[in-house]
Image: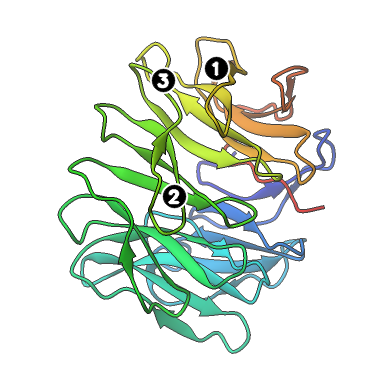
Amino acid sequence: MDGDNEIYVMNSDATGQVRLTDNEMNDEWPAWSHNGLKIAFKSDRDGSHGVYIMNADGSDQTRLSRLTAGPGFPVWSRDDAEIAFDAIYDGMTDIYVVRLHGRSVRRLTTENSNDERPSWSPDGKMIVFISTRNGNAEIYVMNSDGSNQKRLTNNNLFDGFPSWSPNGSLILFESARDGNSEIYLMEPDGSNQRRLTFNNTEDGYPKWSPDGRTIIHDTDINKDRNYELFSLTLDGRHHIRLTHNSADDGYISWTPDGTLLCFMSDRDGNYEIYRMNQDGSSVVRLTHNDAKDTQPSWSPF
């Protein structure tokens, strides 16, 4: 509201909106710990983008690393003991892990490339990520200590935004290998890569439902950069459009029980936060102000 990005929390019915950060720089990409006690986020309040944590009420805001944070956002391990993030070092982006106890930081990738967008496996033993080390963005996996780095995808076009299924049996990702961005699945070893969407426009930013049975993604349905939200089953047979307007809808977050979604949309003139049922019904606008409200994230409880 004052020209820079700040982090707020609110109840699911839009009541109780509370500002958690308050400075003249940008605080963004909030991510709840799995136990709901802390929030990780990016901030440039100290002159460069870094990864910070705070308590759920906004207290005890602490920078975890002096490294300059990269294009991705912080990701908690399942036991909340560590946070993976990408950071810029010597002009390239690498993946790091910081352990909250003791604040020790480990660099996991050291290639002369951009390594970004880490995603933990549910058991915390592995991390999947994007790397340009072979010339274009491909998907790799490694042990959580950085060892045994393996390439999972191999083609001449973009593969990205990988994420593990809740039970760890599949990796969801986006790929442009067939001419435009579509949604794909593969096994954790890179086998059985299969395409789920078949459109002549971009499908991207896929996200798992909490039970791992459904995928939500956005689609540039009219090729006008105004994205709509769709749900998709794992076999690709049930592909359902959830939003219907001429504006941009995106950046979804599920409730822990999978019954509700929140997302950002500029359907009413600027970006606000909305809530709807998982089938797209009962859309409710949650924020109302002249500033942009974006990057929603449901608390775990």
Residue 220: give its label: 3
Q: Bin the neighbour count of mark 3 within 10 Å (Cα to Cα): few under 14, some 14-19, many 20 and up.
A: some
Q: Which of marks 3 and 2 is in front?
A: 2
Sequence-wise, the earlier of marks 1 and 2 is 2
Q: Which of 114 and 128 is in front in this view?
A: 128
Note whether residue 292 is visible. Answer: no
| Circle 1: element type | loop
Q: Name the residue under label 1.
A: 269
Calculate the distance from the C-alpha at mark 3 to the C-alpha at mark 1.
Answer: 19 Å
Q: Which of 48 and 274 is in front in this view?
A: 274
Task: Of the two numbered discs 3 and 2 on the same chain, state the one appearing first in sequence.
Answer: 2
Residue 248 is situated, as x and y percent measured from the top left of the image, at: 49, 21
Amino acid under disc 1: Gly
Q: What residue is shown with label 2?
A: 162
- Report the residue at 30% width, 51% height from top: 153
Hey, what amino acid is under mark 2?
Pro
Q: What residue lies at 33% left-to-right and 16% top-to-bottom? A: 200
